Amino acid sequence: MTIDSDGNLWVAAVAAGRVLKVDGGKPETLLDTVHFPTEYVTSVTFGGQNLDELYVTTARGASAEMKPGAPGGGALYRVTETGSKGLPAVNFKLSD
């Protein structure tokens, strides 16, 4: 999952084939749903020069619960025109 610059939560719905955009102020409010041609959506993050592209990873059938060879599985998807932007990364140094 990731958070956009408006404080909304974007959640990869594993085994559901979609990413959900949830209102950060009202978690019971679903703002948007992005559907994919594969069931196993695994992770989501913003990227691109303006942090306005949503990158979504997916999985193929790798466990007993997953259907092997699911169409579109194992691909990386780039979603544009979501109307949202991500937040820049925060750099930090781990102490020794």
Image (cartoon, rainbow, N blue to C red):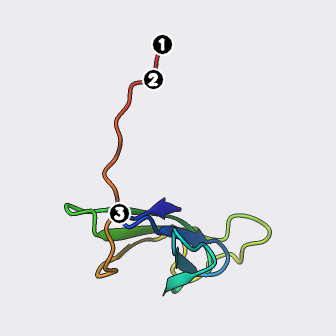
Does residue 74 show up?
Answer: no
* Mark 3 Cα shell of 10 Å, populated few (<14), some (14-19), many (≥20): few
**Real-space CA distance between mark 1 and mark 3, rounded to the nearest whole angstrom:** 32 Å
| Residues at circles 2 and 1 in contact by the CB criterion of under 8 Å | yes
Residue identified by numbered label 2: 94
Find residue 4 and report its horizontal and vertical position in percent: 39, 65
The residue that appears at 29% across and 82% down in the rendered structure is: 81
The residue that appears at 64% across and 71% down in the rendered structure is: 14
**Real-space CA distance between mark 2 and mark 1, rounded to the nearest whole angstrom:** 7 Å
Of residues 1 and 66, which is closer to you in this image?
1
- Of the numbered discs 2 and 3, the one sitting upstream in the chain is 3
Residue 63 vs residue 8: left or right?
Answer: right
Find residue 51 and report its horizontal and vertical position in percent: 27, 63
Residue identified by numbered label 1: 96
Q: Is residue 82 above or below residue 61?
A: below
Does residue 56 show up?
Answer: yes
- Marks 1 and 3: which is nearer the front? 3
- Marks 2 and 3: which is nearer the front? 3
The residue type indicated by label 1 comes to: Asp
Specify the farthest residue to the top: 96
Q: Secondary structure at mark 1?
A: loop
The residue type indicated by label 2 comes to: Leu
* Mark 1 Cα shell of 10 Å, populated few (<14), some (14-19), many (≥20): few
Residue 84 vs residue 67: left or right?
Answer: left
Find residue 87 and report its horizontal and vertical position in percent: 34, 56
- Of the numbered discs 1 and 3, the one sitting upstream in the chain is 3
Q: Secondary structure at mark 3?
A: loop
Residue identified by numbered label 3: 5
Q: Is residue 86 above or below residue 92?
A: below
Specify the farthest residue to the right: 64
The residue that appears at 55% across and 69% down in the rendered structure is: 11
The residue type indicated by label 3 comes to: Ser
